[in-house]
Amino acid sequence: MLEDASIRDLSALMTAARAAYNVISATSAAQRRQALMEIASALRTHEAEILEANQRDLGHAEGNAAFLDRLTLTSQRLHDMAKAVERIAALPDPVGKVMQEWTRPNGLVIRQVSTPIGVIGMIFESRPNVGVDAAALCIKSGNAIILRGGSESYHSTQSLMRAVQQGLRHAGLPVATVQSVPDTDRARVTEMLHAQGQIDLLIPRGGKSLVTRVMQEARVPVLAHAEGLCHSFVHQDARLEMARAVIANAKMRRPGICGATETLLLDRAIAPTFLPVLVADLSTLGCHCRGDAAARAILPTLDPASERDFATEWLDAELSIAIVDGVDGACAHIRHYGSGHTEAIITENEAAAESFMRGVPSAVVMWNASTQFCDGGEFGFGGEIGISTGRLHARGPVGVAQLTTYRYEVRGDGQTRP
């Protein structure tokens, strides 16, 4: 049976997190790696208990198929979670890395060295595995973390975090390195948003309303993306069989994730022949397509796509389609409607691909690949704590390296400033 080591008062919880950070930030890479291996073992050992807690959450859950899929834990998903923790454990240590070094004319040696950020606060909805990924990444990068999961995943999150804390305990590290808010009171979110000096960085993961609220109300720095309104553009020089496979995967592999393509952009030069093929492929997979006036002129059976549709992150088997004039038209559409998450071009034309990749302002841009590859695990990060569409610090999938900041270390030999 997993031990409950939770602290009930949020202020005390944050104080404990700061004390734990002071310890873990000074630990060796070997100690943090051992903790992660112990956590992976605890997840496997306590599988029955964790899955029982998940069933309690599912018994009260209401939502569409995509929501229930995000909430559900299975034996396979739990074992995949443990493997992800082990992959993170095996990554190079991101702490204490000399990023730059130079010597000034007066002999001073200056180094830019990576350091942990501090106490991370994470507010998330429905997906209980998110908490484990976040905990593992923070431990690896020498940070402490406070998790506030949604009420719909409460029992799952609590059970998973008890396993994480057991791993920390067995490795001799403070259990307060990873803590979960021990109730579903919404006032806790406000407390975290206003926790200047106690939480160093907030990371929200969930629906647009949650992320927007955090970004608007937080009094501490926020790393987030509000929407994953991703686009895939099929250029006139695309290899069509490749395009069919990539678009089907980008939309329908898992329609409910933020890296799923929500809008298909099709080059006008190939639209008359290729649009019916793509729509037929997607319809066979259960996707409902709607198109702009140009698309409907080619395929009148399409439902009309409105301005609002092109600004919608569907997170479901729904797709908006627009016909555009080459790379410039695709880039203009994305700049107008996009959320800065992930965009892809499918083409054999290198000049067109480079122009597209320079022309969109998003955090991740892909060439001849599914947008669903926007994922920390697929990037080789071991996992991710979230996706950032901001312009500062971290962009795209946020892994261990992005959970560090830096300091300058200056070494002298008695120099004084004139």
Image: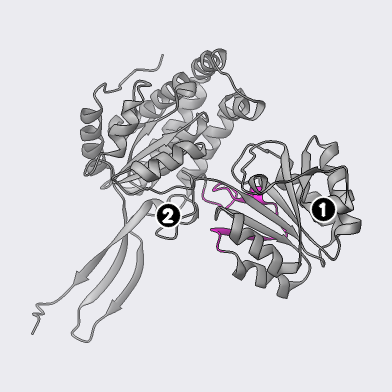
Instruction: State which quarter of the image contains the N terminus.
Output: top left
Closer to the camera, 19 or 189?
A: 189
Residue denoted by label 2: 401
Quarter of the image where one finds residue 336: bottom right
Residue 173 visible somewhere in the drawing: no
Inter-mark Cα distance, 1 to 2: 43 Å
Find numbered disc 1 in the image and state the secondary structure of the residue it sits on.
helix
Closer to the camera, 143 or 319?
A: 319
| Number of the front mark, 1 or 2 | 1
**Magenta stretch: residue 190 in it?**
no
Q: Bin the neighbour count of mark 1 within 10 Å (Cα to Cα): few under 14, some 14-19, many 20 and up.
A: many
Quarter of the image where one finds residue 158: top left
Residue 269 drawn at (x, y percent)? 85, 66
Residue positioned most to the right: 273
Amino acid found under the numbered disc labelled 1: Ala
Which residue is at a point 83% across and 43% down the rendered structure image? 302
Q: Magenta stretch?
A: 361-381
Quarter of the image where one finds residue 359: bottom right
The numbered disc on residue 285 is: none
Amino acid found under the numbered disc labelled 2: Ala
| Left or right for 157, reference 165 | right
Residue 219 visible somewhere in the drawing: yes
| Image position of 100 with respect to 183: above or below | below
The numbered disc on residue 295 is: 1
